[in-house]
Amino acid sequence: MTETVPMVRAENVHKSYGHIEVLKGIDLEVSKGEVFCLIGPSGSGKSTFLRCINHLEKVNAGRLYVDGELVGYRQKGDKLYELKDSEVARQRRDIGMVFQRFNLFPHMTAAENVMEAPIQVKGVSKAAARERAHHLLERVGLGDKARNYPAQLSGGQQQRVAIARALAMDPKLMLFDEPTSALDPELVGDVLDVMRDLAESGMTMVVVTHEMGFAREVGDNLVFMDGGVVVESGDPREVLTNPRHERTQSFLSKVL
């Protein structure tokens, strides 16, 4: 039987800013095709960990692998050497990231926002990129908004364009950093629907979220983080219904 390599593997990951230790030895694995949800209070290290996965933040100790490949570094003997920017950029091409704020280019239409990276990074022809952009905008329910500029779109629509933009690079892994927390409550559902559809299509997703309903319904695995450590993990329905750890119980009593 062949052992499948996890999509993400974190081994004793530490991250500090000066004297402040934000991640204190994170160990976890995300299987291929899994929806992996991270919950916890603000400042618990969730978003920092997410940003370490694609080397937007450099780890101070430990190892992070995506699809079996060490992220951000090359190992020779016992030593780690940081990869060149071009090599880090190559690794990032396979990892889509959706932020809290949509970060769309304001001077480009929805379609142009989705087309930009495939043209610039992958050398895809304009015609092929446009066709794919329209297909992806259809997929996120915005087929009629291709020519609209970000300022003409609601927050929820902008976030769905951001998801389409990340998908345009054909990533093998999608990272979501609280993708609905900047949205008006009535716009959250549309974004979560797109994420549900992605999950059903088999996309591997790591999601930092406050949406407990989404975690319960769509998540395969749930990790509760606090103070830079994994406090509790398991099946989302189990953790959310019967948290074992007192700290998890106290957190959930405030948010559920």
Image (spheres, rainbow, N blue to C red):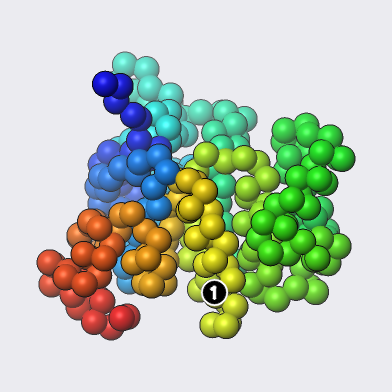
Q: Residues within 10 Å of mark 1 (few under 14, many from 20)?
A: some
Give, as a three-letter code, the residue at label 1.
Gly
Q: Residue at x 69, y 64 (%)?
A: 141
Residue at disc 1, secondary structure: helix
Q: Which image quarter holds the N terminus?
A: top left
Residue 52 location, x and y as percent?
43, 46
* The one of 2 and 118 positioned closer to us in this rendering: 2
Q: Is residue 224 left or right of residue 116?
A: left
The vertical placement of 89 against 136, above or below, is above
Q: Residue at x 40, y 61 (%)?
A: 218
**How many numbered dots are placed on residues in this image?**
1
Q: Is residue 177 left or right of residue 116?
A: left
The vertical placement of 227 against 76, above or below, is below
User: Is residue 140 visible from the viewing direction of this image?
Assistant: yes
Residue 92 location, x and y as percent?
56, 39
Q: Residue at x 30, y 42 (%)?
A: 29
Residue 111 location, x and y as percent?
80, 55
Q: In the rendered image, which quarter is residue 217 located in?
A: bottom left
Pointer 1 residue: 189
